[in-house]
Image (spheres, helix red, strand yellow):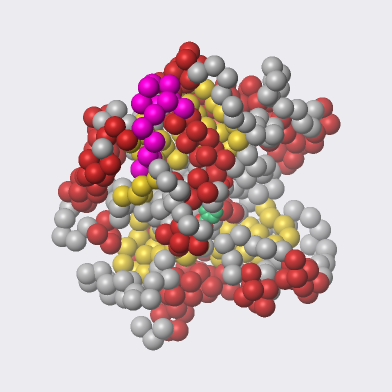
C-alpha cells in the first residue's frame, strides 16, 4: 500500500511520546501505565492500512473504532469538507433556521433506514444520541399520561456510550462500579450469549430463554413502570455477541405485549456492517427509535443521529410543543456534508452489497478457519463483524479463570505483528473497513493465528 503522503516524512517519535505521556489523558486507559510504556504514534492511513511514526505498516482490523466503513484516505470527503467550510462552516438549527446539508442528510437517512422512522435529530456522538433517546422516551410517556414508565431495560455487556446516561443504559459493570452507576431508572438483563450460557440447548431454545429474561424483569418492575428496552442488534464492544435467530422475534413480541418502546442502537451495526444497511434489516427489527453514529460519517467527522419513529414523533409533535433539547453541533453543516458524501460513496460503490455477497462471506469463511485451533472455543461472524473466542478448553467450553489476561496478551501480539484487533474479555473482536480486500483478510487471519500461537506458548497452554 502506498502511503497517502511523502514516505520520507519523518517524525520525532520520542518527543511526541514524551509530550503525550506528560499531558494527554487517554480514554479507557491506565494513564500512568501508558505514560510509562509510551503510546504508538499513528501518523497516516489509507484504505485499511495505518502507518505509525516509525514507518510500520499496520492492518486495521477494527476500522478505527468500528467506524471507518469506507476506509481511510477518501479525498472526496476532504473536498466536501473544505468546500462546506468555505461556504458555511457553522450555523445552528435552533432558532427557526436550517442548513442544506442537515436537511438533505435527514432526508437521506429517512430513505435508508427501515420504514416508519421519518424524523431525525442530530447529535455529535453515539453517547449524545443515546442520551437524546432517553429524553425522547421519557417525554413520550409523560405526554401519554404514564410518567411512571421511567425505567429502560438494557443488557449486560451492552455498550451505549460513556456519558452518565450512556453508561447507565449499558451493562458494563466495571464502568458502573467506578462512578456509582447506573443512575436510577436503568435495569439490565442477561445477553443472548450462547457460548457462555447455552449449555446443551440448541441456539434457538437458548434464544427463547434469554428473551424470557426480559419478560421476567418486566414482571419484577411492573409493566406500568417500564418505558423501553434498548439493544444493539449485535453487541459490539461487549464481545460481538450474535443473538440466535429466535431471540429478537420473541423480544419484540414481549415489547409489543407490554406496550414498551423498542430502541435499536445501530451505532456499530449501521451502514453496512452486518451485510445490510442496518442490523435492524438483518434481524428484522422494527424499532421505535434508532441511534446512529460511527459509520454515518465513517468517522471522518463526529456526527450522530436519532431516528424517531412515527409513534413517538407524532405524540411529541402533536401534543408536546417545544422540546427543550439540543446541542451546539446538532446538524453541524460540515459534519452533515461529509456524512452525505460518505453515504453517497457507500451507495454508489455498492459497499453494503459487497459485504452481503462478496467480502462478508469470504471474511466469515477465512475467520472460521481458525476454529480448528485448540485455544479457539468459537468463531462467530455476520457481515464484516466477528469474534474469535479463546478458551482454556474447547470441551465445555471452559473459560480462563482470570478473565481478560489471555485476550489482552493476544491483542498485544497482534499489535506487535502489525494487526489491530480488540480484545474483549478473552475474545478477539474484528470489524474491518468495508473496503478491505481479500488479500488483506487473508493477512488478518494469518497474523491472528500467529498471535494465538504466541499467546498459547506464553501461557504454556
Ligand atoms: N452505542 C454503541 C453500540 C457503541 O458501540 C456508542 C453507542 C457510543 O458512541 P460514542 O460516539 O459516544 O463513543 C458506542 C461506542 C470499544 C469502543 O473499545 C466502542 C465504542 C466506543 C469506544 C470504544 O470497543 N462504541
Res. 182 visible in picture: yes
Quadrant in the rendering for residue 124: top right
What residue is at 47 percent from the left and 68 percent from the top? 448
Residue 235's x, y, as percent?
A: 40, 50
**Residue under the point 49% across and 50% down:** 167
The quadrant the N terminus occupies is: bottom right
In the image, which residues are magenta? 139-153
Residue 407 or residue 218, whichever sits in front: 218
Residue drawn at point x = 75 percent, y = 36 percent: 81
Q: Nearer the viewer, residue 228 or 407?
A: 228
Q: Is residue 429 visible?
A: no
Q: Using residue 353 as the reference point, say whether residue 202 is left or right of it.
A: left
Q: Nearer the viewer, residue 285 or 1?
A: 285
Query: What number of labels is visible?
Result: 0
| Residue placed furthest toward the top | 318
Residue 191 position within the rendered picture, expressed as x and y whole percent measured from the top left: 32, 52
Instruction: Report the quarter where the C terminus lies.
Output: bottom left
Residue 48, quarter of the rendered image? bottom right
| Towards the viewer: 292 or 113 | 292
**Left or right of 3: which side holds 425?**
left
Is residue 150 found inside the magenta-colored segment of the image? yes
Q: Is 200 drawn above or below residue 405 in the view shown? A: above
- Up the image or down, 420 lies above or below 398; here it is above
Q: Is residue 421 above or below residue 47?
A: below
* Quadrant position of residue 96: top right
Residue drawn at 59 percent across, 42 percent down: 125
Amino acid at each position: 500500500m502506498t502511503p497517502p503522503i511523502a514516505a520520507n516524512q519523518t517524525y520525532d517519535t520520542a518527543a511526541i511520546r514524551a509530550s503525550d505521556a506528560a499531558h494527554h489523558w487517554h480514554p479507557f486507559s491506565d494513564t500512568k501505565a501508558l505514560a510509562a510504556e509510551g503510546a504508538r504514534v499513528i501518523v497516516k492511513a489509507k484504505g485499511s492500512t495505518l502507518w505509525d511514526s516509525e514507518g510500520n505498516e499496520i492492518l486495521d482490523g477494527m476500522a478505527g473504532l468500528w467506524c471507518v466503513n469506507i476506509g481511510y484516505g477518501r479525498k472526496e470527503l476532504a473536498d466536501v469538507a473544505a468546500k462546506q467550510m468555505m461556504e458555511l462552516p457553522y450555523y445552528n438549527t435552533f432558532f427557526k433556521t436550517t442548513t442544506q446539508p442537515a436537511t438533505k442528510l435527514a432526508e437521506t437517512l429517512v430513505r435508508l433506514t427501515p420504514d416508519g422512522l421519518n424524523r431525525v435529530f442530530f447529535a455529535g456522538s453515539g453517547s449524545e444520541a443515546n442520551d437524546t433517546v432517553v429524553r425522547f422516551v421519557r417525554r413520550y410517556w409523560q405526554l401519554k399520561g404514564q410518567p411512571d414508565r421511567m425505567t429502560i431495560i438494557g443488557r449486560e455487556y451492552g455498550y451505549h456510550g460513556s456519558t452518565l446516561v450512556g453508561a447507565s443504559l449499558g451493562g458494563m459493570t466495571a464502568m458502573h462500579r467506578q462512578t456509582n452507576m447506573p443512575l436510577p431508572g436503568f435495569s439490565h438483563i442477561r445477553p443472548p450469549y450462547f457460548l457462555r450460557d447455552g449449555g446443551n440447548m440448541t441456539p434457538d431454545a437458548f434464544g427463547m430463554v434469554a428473551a424470557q429474561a426480559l419478560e421476567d424483569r418486566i414482571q419484577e418492575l411492573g409493566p406500568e413502570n417500564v418505558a423501553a428496552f434498548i439493544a444493539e442488534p449485535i453487541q459490539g464492544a461487549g464481545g460481538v455477541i450474535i443473538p440466535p435467530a429466535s431471540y429478537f422475534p420473541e423480544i419484540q413480541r414481549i415489547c409489543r405485549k407490554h406496550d414498551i418502546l423498542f430502541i435499536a442502537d445501530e451505532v456499530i451495526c449501521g451502514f453496512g456492517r452486518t451485510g445490510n444497511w442496518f442490523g435492524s434489516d438483518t434481524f428484522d427489527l422494527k424499532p421505535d427509535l434508532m441511534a446512529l453514529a460511527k459509520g454515518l460519517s465513517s468517522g471522518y467527522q463526529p456526527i450522530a443521529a436519532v431516528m424517531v419513529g412515527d409513534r413517538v414523533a407524532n405524540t411529541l409533535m402533536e401534543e408536546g410543543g417545544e422540546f427543550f433539547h439540543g446541542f451546539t453541533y446538532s446538524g453541524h453543516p460540515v459534519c452533515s456534508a461529509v456524512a452525505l458524501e460518505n453515504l453517497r460513496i457507500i451507495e454508489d460503490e455498492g459497499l453494503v452489497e459487497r459485504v452481503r455477497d462478496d467480502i462478508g462471506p469470504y471474511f466469515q469463511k477465512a475467520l472460521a478457519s481458525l476454529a480448528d485451533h485448540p485455544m479457539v472455543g468459537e468463531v462467530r461472524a455476520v457481515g464484516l463483524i466477528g469474534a474469535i473466542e479463546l478458551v482454556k478448553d474447547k470441551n465445555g467450553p471452559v473459560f480462563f479463570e482470570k478473565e481478560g489476561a489471555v485476550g489482552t496478551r493476544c491483542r498485544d501480539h497482534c499489535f506487535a505483528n502489525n494487526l489491530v484487533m480488540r480484545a474483549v474479555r478473552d475474545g478477539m473482536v474484528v470489524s474491518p473497513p468495508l473496503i478491505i480486500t481479500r488479500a488483506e483478510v487473508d493477512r488478518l487471519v494469518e497474523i491472528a493465528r500467529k498471535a494465538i500461537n504466541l499467546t498459547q506458548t506464553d501461557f504454556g497452554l
